[in-house]
Image (cartoon, grey):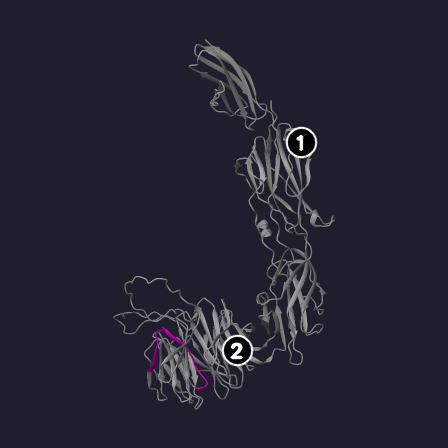
Amino acid sequence: MRKILPVLWVALLAFSAAAEDTRFWHQNKYAQFSKGTPWGVALRSDGEILLAPEFRELADPNLEYVWDVVEDPRGNLYLAGGSPAKVIKLGADGQVTTVFESKELEVHALALDPRDASLYLATSPDGRVHKITPAGEASVFFEPGTKYLWDIVLHADGTLYLATGDKGEIYRIAPDGTGELFFKSDETHIRSFALAPNGQLYAGTEPNGLVLRLSPDGQAFVLYEMDRKEVTNLQFDAAGNLYVAAIGRKAPTPAFPRAPTPAAPVQPPTTSAQGVTPSVVVTATAPATSTQPTARRPDLPRFPAGGSTIIRIAPDGSPEKLWASRTELVYSLSFAADGRLLAGTGNKGKLLAIDSATLFTHLAKASGQQITAVVRGQRGNIFAATANPGKVYRLGPELASEGIFESDVFDAELFSQWGRVRWQTRSPGNPTVRLFTRTGNTSDPQKHWSAWSEAYTEAAGSVITSPQARFIQWKTVLKATDGRTPSLSEVSIAYLRRNLPPRVTKIIVQTPGIALRTLSTPQAAQPVQLELPSASNARARAAAPASASNSSKTAPRIAPAPHGVAQTGARSVIWSTEDPNQDELIFSVYYRGEEETRWKLMKDNLSSSFPSWDAATLPDGAYHIKVVASDAPSNPPDLSLSGENVSDRFEVDNTPPRIDNLTAAPRSRTVEVRFRAQDSYSPLQKAEYSLDAGEWKSIFPASRTTDARQHSYTVRLKDLEPGEHTVVVRVYDQFDNPVLAKTTFLVQ
């Protein structure tokens, strides 16, 4: 009888190569610093933290949004906003008064006549221009008969230009209030105005983002088409360069003409101050009980997606892209006292300074979600207005005397020991830059964390005194010296994560007759489906590349995936492991019989494979496998840890069945073959016979079902030719162990 030697193959599903040693949390980029919280500090796009100009709230006029701000010669500010439509006067003495209020939803634009301090304002959605005299008397100055009034600008000769939608028209209004259509475009909206130093009018449109130059007789020339849909602001500098801000993603142009569709009911224009649809509904046919259109309060401001772009157009007409963002939306432009371009953005209320085509600075953050207007006052002051909620701020001109920056919270993922904190500054050793740390074991630093540490002053490296924990946060305090700002450009925190034991998460003993190969092994047998442990979240995280900014570790290696092949007598086992520290692991494998108490070592110091194991050395019976994983290769002996797991019960059966009482009783040309088969351990699986070396044919036992360790079989062979014949019977148990027997008989 041929001996079958089962073979045990072990696959390590995944393992890590990196030891748990000192790691570093580095922060030195704007994208990293921008996740923190600044108070009185500015963040430069090249990764530097500086003191910012003072950013102080001047007034909260109790408006949802403030769209425009102008300053009169006496230093009084006028704020346009809503809802409802209001103009608020913020006096130079700090007093706040309402100088205009109406039933309209908003005042969107203001213009001040410097000759007599008359104030012009444009309302929406009823579309009127109002005039407020120096005596405070308000009256309707001009009604263009259109729904949306977006911008107004006053020429030096006293002419007022009005930008409108939804027909894309510009009106020219004389000082006496008589107006005429100055220009009609193919655009839906004229959104913004600017007057060049020579008095020529420029306009921005929506939805194609056109920058138009208009001649005195109303002829337009397209100076530039933006890559965004809506031109929100135009500003000229002293040298005659035109700066253009545009927002929103343009609708894609269809590649082929579309079939005409039935005309839809006419709807009113729907572009808001940001080129999106305000919730204004005008009925096509008024109800019989009313002749007035009905409108509901628009949900303003609603801001489009698609980011923004700022370009600079030189006096000769040549354009240059200065800045672009996929997330920030620029609504307003102005200039600081030093000539830098300022940009008010949303939807995080950031005020930016565009230093160059490659550098910008986040100067301040307002409590409102959008900075809708940035205005340089007559004395050089910078005023910023916001929406959601509507407030007014003043920027500078003096630096903040002290600024604070709090980093985001860093998750070491495991309980950790902290090393040293280091930082880079323009003023090393100068106490004007101080760092602090705090730690905790929740992601929210406001919930039961340690107090802030004492100040660290050694930029070259200070030992962190905060308690060991999982999470850490740092903050810096910058103080001005002689009107100059210190800076911070990099912070690095060293930490060592606590070593945790590895886990053997699952052990699966495969069904008999399956051997394991790696994908790199040439196939020489029929592949079969393996039963594999499911990948856990922890293992999936371990397989992800480590962040360069958060860790000095390399990504873990993944062992070649095994695949199964059919091999008679083979047994295979697969296990999966996890190690929170991503340590390199070694394995020991033990076995124990079901009725035994002591584990016996099969093999130790395994890394990625297991040699063949002669399972015939084990008697038939039930067993368990135990796998012990150790992180000894990655840790000192006194710090290494191990984890283990035990497989489910599995059976070994190396002994084939036995065939007894095989007889053949000829009766004329029919022969009745009888035998009994039994196995000492496992149930029988199947029986078959072959007559005179013919093909194998199945035999059912007398009970019809093959499910016991002992069965009786009978097979009748009919219509046999006279002479000698040989019949061979073969029986398998459930572990595919076969036994054969034969008998020879004579047919008369």
Residue 129 x/y as whole percent: 37, 82
Report which residue position mark 1 lands on. 596
Q: Residue furthest bottom?
A: 115
Above/below status of 468 relative to 221? above
Report which residue position mark 2 lands on. 341
Residue displayed at 27% across by 70% down: 285
Above/below status of 298 relative to 541? below
Of pointers 2 and 1, the one earlier in the residue sequence = 2
Question: How would you classify the magenta stretch by its main secondary structure?
Answer: strand
| Secondary element at image label 2 | strand
Q: Residue furthest top?
A: 748
Number of marks in the rendered image:
2
Above/below status of 692 relative to 20? above
Above/below status of 238 relative to 46? below
Quarter containing the C terminus: top left
Residues tagged 2 and 1 counted as in contact (Cβ below 8 A): no
Residue displayed at 55% across by 82% down: 337
Nearest to the observer: residue 266 or residue 359 = 359
Q: Amino acid at mark 2?
A: Leu
Q: CA distance from mark 2 to mark 1?
A: 82 Å
**Magenta region: which residues?**
181-198
